[in-house]
Amino acid sequence: MLRIRLARVGSRGNPHYRVVVIDARSPQGSDYVDRLGYYNPQTDPATIVLDGAKVTSWLQKGAQPSETVAKLLRRQGILPKG
């Protein structure tokens, strides 16, 4: 099963995250299938940049978002609130 989750990038103490599609069984840091955007929690407000068309396409293909990514998708209006 494919999963939409965060992949940490950036230096120590300065985290940035890529929103990626990856096999659910893959360990953290392994190669991903597709990159959907990025998330920077250190800006005020947090920067979230997502390709909505790609995200919707992967969700329709059956990819499941992690809890954190689901919250980001709701914030962006891609997933319904609730």
Image: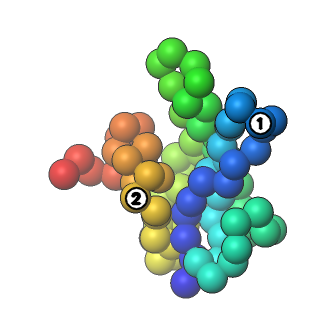
> Residue pushed farthest top?
44
Question: Is the residue under label 2 in contact with that under label 1 (CB below 8 Å)?
Answer: no
Q: How many marks?
A: 2
Marks 1 and 2, how far apart at CA: 24 Å
Q: Which residue is mark 1?
A: 12
Q: Residue at x 55, y 84 (%)?
A: 1
| Residue 77 image offset from top left, x and y in percent | 35, 41
Circle 1 SS class = loop
**Residue name at image x 54 percent, y 51 percent:** 53
Q: Residue at x 46, y 63 (%)?
A: 65
Q: Nearer the viewer, residue 38 or 9?
A: 9
Residue type at mark 2: give it. Glu
Residue 54 makes an appearance in the image:
no
Mark 1: few/some/many CA within 10 Å (<14, 14-19, 20+): few
Image height check: is 50 above or below 3? above
Q: State left or right for residue 7 relative to residue 59.
A: right
**Color style of the picture:** rainbow
Q: Is residue 32 toward the left or the right of residue 79 in the image?
A: right
Look at the picture and state if 81 lies above or below 49: below
- Residue 50, percent from left and from top: 57, 42
Residue 63 visible in the snapshot: yes
Q: Which residue is mark 2?
A: 67
Classify mark 2: residues with Cα within 10 Å, few (<14), some (14-19) or many (20+): few
Q: Is residue 48 above or below residue 72?
A: above
Measured along the vertical axis of the image, is residue 21 above or below residue 46? Answer: below
Residue 60, how many percent across, how many down?
A: 45, 70
Amino acid at pointer 1: Arg
Judged from the image, the secondary structure of the residue bearing numbered disc 2 is helix
